[in-house]
Image (tube, rainbow, N blue to C red):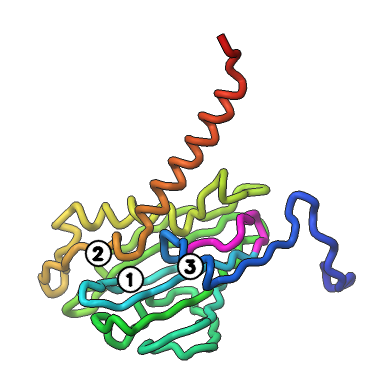
Amino acid sequence: MTEDNPVIPPPRRDRPPLKVNVFEAMQHSNTQLMPLFPYLHPGAMVPAGAMIIGGPNADYGHFFHHNTQDEVVLALAANGAVLGTGQVFVGARIHGVNSFLKKEKDAKSFAIMVITQRQAESGPQREACSLRCEKCHEEIYLKEFDATPPPDALEGEHPFVSVAVLPELFADFNNDEARRVCTKCGHLNRPFPVASWGWDRYATQSATTIAGRQALKQATQTPIK
């Protein structure tokens, strides 16, 4: 589709239209920001589900996401959250991310969202995550990563970079106490609660399923003795 030809072409045969019930999908989710469809190619819209649940042990922390592409947030259903059911907004290119719950420790609080990220049409796509001091709010950590989508990328072959790199990214902060000391006020910040977001599970399970595909492929190519 272009300005001169405002007609959406039919989908490619290898990218058939798909549909999903978000509530059913989130019953089986293993991470926050879980792609609902496998298409991650340049120019793709990537709707991703997120389900935040409050409780006595809930602890999501607060970080900032930097992206060269736009994101649209739709709160499908929420209770006890700062977002209302049905609320839609466009996130800033640099935006804070937390649980969006008014009281994280309230087990009745939740937010089920669809966050749609646009993949760059061409050229590089850069993302970053940053953290600020819990005491004085000075930025104490910033790490960029390359999120440029590979051509014809499918999630089964190329895990969603915006999630898959985060365990390692935050490990650099969590495992180095010196990084967690604020140079402005001297406060020692606690490690970021990566496990609460499920990013580590997504990265591990993605790597395992990719290895599994390769093992199955090799098995089908090995002659039976």
- Looking at the picture, how far across and down is residue 53, in whole percent? 35, 75
Left or right: where does residue 6 sit relative to residue 166?
A: right
Between 202 and 69, the one nearer to me in the picture: 202
Residue 105 in magenta stretch: no
Q: Residue furthest top?
A: 225
Residue topped by disc 1? 63
Between 12 and 188, the one nearer to me in the picture: 12
Q: Quadrant of the N terminus?
A: bottom right
Q: Is residue 90 above or below residue 124?
A: below
Cα separation between marks 3 and 1: 23 Å
Circles 2 and 1, Cβ within 8 Å, touching? The answer is: yes
The magenta span reads 33-44
Residue topped by disc 2? 192
Secondary structure of the residue carrying tag 3 is helix
Of circles 3 and 1, the one toward us is 3
Q: Earlier in the sequence, mark 2 or mark 1?
A: 1
Residue for point 16% across, 68% down: 189
User: Disc 2 marks which amino acid?
Assistant: Phe
Residue topped by disc 3? 26
User: Disc 3 marks which amino acid?
Assistant: Met
User: Disc 1 marks which amino acid?
Assistant: Phe
Q: Residue furthest right?
A: 5
